[in-house]
Amino acid sequence: MNSLEGTGALFRLYLRRDRLVAPVWIVLLGALPLLYAVSFEGLYPTASDRQAFYLGTVAMPAQAALVGPIFGSDLGALVSWRSGLVLALVPLAAILTVVRHTRGEEDAGRTELIGSTAVGRYAGLAAAISLAGTGVAATGALSSITLWAFGLPVAGSVAYGASVVVVGLVFVGCAAVAAQAASGARAARGYALGVLAAAFVLRAIGDAGSGTLSWLSPIGWSAQVRPFAGERWWPMLMSLATAALLLAAAVRAAERRDLGSGLLAERRGRASAASTLAGPVALAWRLTRGASFGWTVGIALFGIAIGLSARGIGGQLGSSTAISDALGKFGGTTLEQSFVAAVLSMVGIMVAAYSVAALLRLHGEEEAGLAEIALATGVSRIRWLTGHLLLAVLGPAWLLLVVGVTIGLPYGSATGDIAGELRSVVGGALIQLPAVWVVTAIGVALFGAVPRFATVLWAILGGFVALGQIGAVVGLPQPWLDLSPFTHVPRLPGAALSLAPIGWLVVTAVGVGIIGSAAFRRRDIRG
């Protein structure tokens, strides 16, 4: 039998399972450069405005570390620079897609079941790679088409989209290798995300300095394509060659391992697990502590970069009325406060993603049959649910505290008022919590009432992002914008604190969470 027999059927199956999640990340990431193009054209309508922004950005190494190198003052070059984070977000989506449909399927026992039919040995791996590759290609194509339709040069539009595709393919290959090396889905995600984090850090350190270290990172290779700034096509050859080598290594590794095992031996646990698995909360913490540590480090580095940039943001953004009006929507009495408030609103969405991932571990545990084992020990359903829910509720609080401190300390040091700025920035960060908890509560309701659609929570969060980040730019009516809980969060620091919307968000989160918990108590456990 052909080793790829059944690849097409599995591809359609995986595509059907991702029919809600995949379009969200493709559209959001693919349309993000267009959003930046609209924003830059409105905020910097003249060449002199864009030149001033370019000079201000070049003078801020922290911005280069956070976003990427900037190569020109043309509208396209500014859009390409501002979209630099897409070069890390598309690989993230690719990694999660590949691991979910390879080791995730093995852990759930479905690969063995499907393998008993007329399906080739590599069909599942090929289908997962094809699905992730198709998503990456669609994202790049959407970016190119929308930028070209906006009026930017064809060559730069194609170069930008191609740079997104090639870095995504590198991490499709990286995830495929990790899926063969790891002993399970959780470890595979850890390995692949560790490589992505290392690539981002190398690119950040390199771009903030001499640029040498950037050439050790696939993200740096795509940044060096320089869309709209004298395109250089040859760095993409490095990405394509690396992707091909990784995919070949994944196929080779798949030949050498048994189903359900990995090339790397699983680490032995402690002889006695009583201290670390003393209850549902301890078990949930053990399962998520690695991801929590990674999120803490990442959010701290992000906060430091923003804190170092905030003091000079006025020189970078300029003093036009459009800039003041745009940032004024985020509150604050100064341009710097408005900038910090705008960043904190985006951080709220970021930590909501952490909450979604922590909560959906419940779904993964149930689908893998592990929930039945835990509940068979005498642990009640509510205790088991609470163990994961506590991390989904308290984890974002910790991350928001970390980002508030890491922004407030360097910013306060630059302004000479550490105590005052730290207090205001930490308050602005923590005020995002009620909106995050509403997202968490919606997840509890989905998991409790309709568990098969629990992963739709990612699409819901993507919808909130679209309403907040895109809806305001395209001028959606306020009732539509009000559908997002993040719209109702006071824009701190600087704005007036209104307790009424915060109270309503908390009440909504508690009410929806109670309804979801009650539904979970009454339904059957899926296995």
Image (cartoon, grey):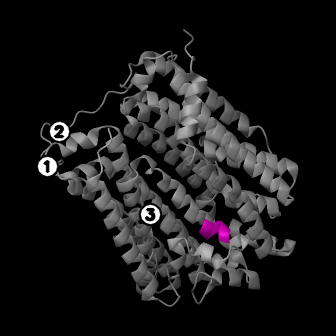
Work out how far the residue at label 2 is from the one at label 3, CA to CA, in angstroms: 31 Å
Seen from the viewer's position, the closer of residues 244 and 23 is: 23
Pointer 2 residue = 270
Report whether residue 275 is seen. yes
144 is higher (above) or lower (below) than 464: above
Pointer 3 residue = 300
Task: Kindly identify the amino acid type of the residue bearing the numbered disc 2.
Answer: Arg
Task: Kindly identify the amino acid type of the residue bearing the numbered disc 1.
Answer: Ser
State which tag comes first along the sequence, 2 or 3.
Answer: 2
Q: Secondary structure at mark 2?
A: loop
Work out how far the residue at label 3 is from the one at label 1, CA to CA, in angstroms: 29 Å
State which tag comes first along the sequence, 3 or 1.
Answer: 1
Seen from the viewer's position, the closer of residues 197 and 521 is: 521
* Stretch of the chain drawn in magenta: 467-471
Which residue shows up at 79% across the image and 40% down it? 233
User: Looking at the picture, how far across and down is residue 282, in whole percent?
Assistant: 21, 53
User: Looking at the picture, how far across and down is residue 433, in whole percent?
Assistant: 41, 72
Report whether residue 297 is seen. no
Pointer 1 residue = 275
Seen from the viewer's position, the closer of residues 395 and 295 is: 395
411 is higher (above) or lower (below) than 215: below
Q: Look at the image and say whether residue 384 sits in the magenta stretch.
A: no
Task: Kindly identify the amino acid type of the residue bearing the numbered disc 3.
Answer: Ala
User: Looking at the picture, how far across and down is residue 103, in whole percent?
Assistant: 43, 32
